[in-house]
Image (cartoon, rainbow, N blue to C red):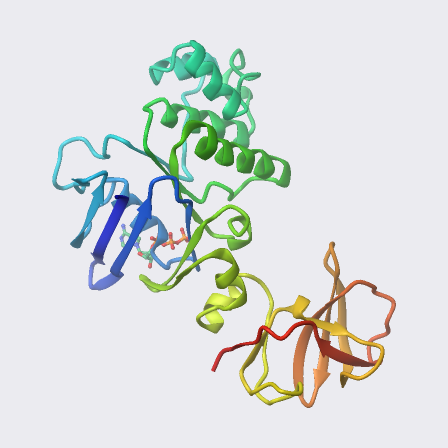
Amino acid sequence: MNLLQVTDIRKKEGQEEVLKGISFTQQSLQKIAIAGESGSGKSTLLKIVAGLGQASEGLVWFNGKKVKGIHEKLMPGHPGIAYLSQHYELRNNYRVEEELAYANLFYDEDSEELYRICRIDHLLKRWTTQLSGGEKQRISLARQLATSPKLLVLDEPFSNLDLVHKQTLKAVIADIGEKLSITILLVSHDPLDILSWADEIILMKDGGIVQQASPEVTYRQPASPYAAGLFGRYTILKQSIFPDTQPGLFLRPEQVAIVAEGGIPGTLQRLDFIGHTYEAEVLVNGEVIVVHIPEGGMAVGSEVRLGLKHRDYWYLG
Ligand SMILES: Nc1ncnc2c1ncn2[C@@H]1O[C@H](COP(=O)(O)OP(=O)(O)OP(=O)(O)O)[C@@H](O)[C@H]1O
């Protein structure tokens, strides 16, 4: 049975339709991430799913029961669904343990495990004013989990976090799924944060779903240039440049290599160090091809030869 079933959700804000018929289902423990450009409707959708917004049309079913909107019931929210927005707040002038007790999270074996999973067990005696943003967020998360939800809905959990806190939160999120058996639906502005985590990625644009697929398919076989661009740089060739390929060939930078012999001649136009590799732009027949290369010693203007690394071609018209 589906844990969550979202059917044809529409939402009007004034004259504008900001959600245009969103439908998807989520199985128990399936990890779904929603991504898309700013303003595409991700947060609006998430609030409706959690019972903290109001759809103009459509239905959300959770665990066989309808999730009512804020205009349909007195207390916003839905039992069994926990929601953490980007704007979490803790009360000032309290110790962390008091703040957690306030959420009915008293110290016992279960809560001890929850604190360990949320990586906050070393923070219990601290004042809430003595915490970093990432620590405050994990305490807010523990408070949400105190309600023993079946579904955890996270809106942009990785925004505003430095790399270290981001890595910690990723470990926390993985543990919440695996050790607490809580299903997670999350929105992320940066799809690179979700490729390694999600079972399925839903891409939104202008209030609609433009692609719903596994991370591999989303990355390698994007439905459109918009979907491709959300996951980093790419090239779509207008001409048939490489042998046995058609116009419209879609290439990620790591699918192309600079080769010593054979290949297609081109001119190195640009070379940038991007950490794990160098990113080059090579001009071939008037088209710029983005290529990842391991070494950065070549001079801009050099002649290079390009080859394709494998034959799993994908075309975008
Ligand atoms: N209360 C509101 N009144 C009017 N328009 C709204 C309201 N809330 C959201 N919108 C509009 O709905 C659209 C979707 O907004 P939403 O916040 O859901 O997008 P998002 O994809 O989550 O964006 P971001 O990544 O920037 O948070 C936007 O055009 C936004 O301006």
Q: Is residue 302 above or below residue 35?
A: below
Between 279 and 256, the one lying in front of the other is 256
Q: Which residue is drawn at 86% across and 74% down?
A: 299
Q: In the rendered image, which quarter contains the N terminus?
A: top left
Between 126 and 21, the one lying in front of the other is 21
The answer to whether residue 73 is left or right of residue 205 is left
Q: In this view, does 113 lie above or below 293?
A: above
Q: Position of residue 276 (x, y in %)?
A: 73, 55
Q: In this view, does 102 lie above or below 239?
A: above
Q: Position of residue 306 (x, y in %)?
A: 75, 79
| Residue 30, quarter of the rendered image | top left
Q: Is residue 29 above or below residue 15?
A: above
Question: Quadrant for ligand 1?
Answer: bottom left
Q: Residue at x 48, y 28 (%)?
A: 138
Q: Is residue 117 visible?
A: yes
Between 142 and 258, the one lying in front of the other is 258
Q: Where is residue 111 in the image (x, y as percent from the top left)?
A: 43, 16
The answer to whether residue 81 is left or right of residue 120 is left
Q: Is residue 94 visible?
A: no
Q: Residue at x 71, y 86 (%)?
A: 284
The answer to whether residue 59 is left or right of residue 207 is left
Q: Which residue is drawn at 51% across and 14% down?
A: 124
- Give the residue furthest to the left: 72
| Residue 131, quarter of the rendered image | top right
Total tally of numbered discs in the picture:
0
Q: Position of residue 128 (x, y in %)?
A: 49, 19
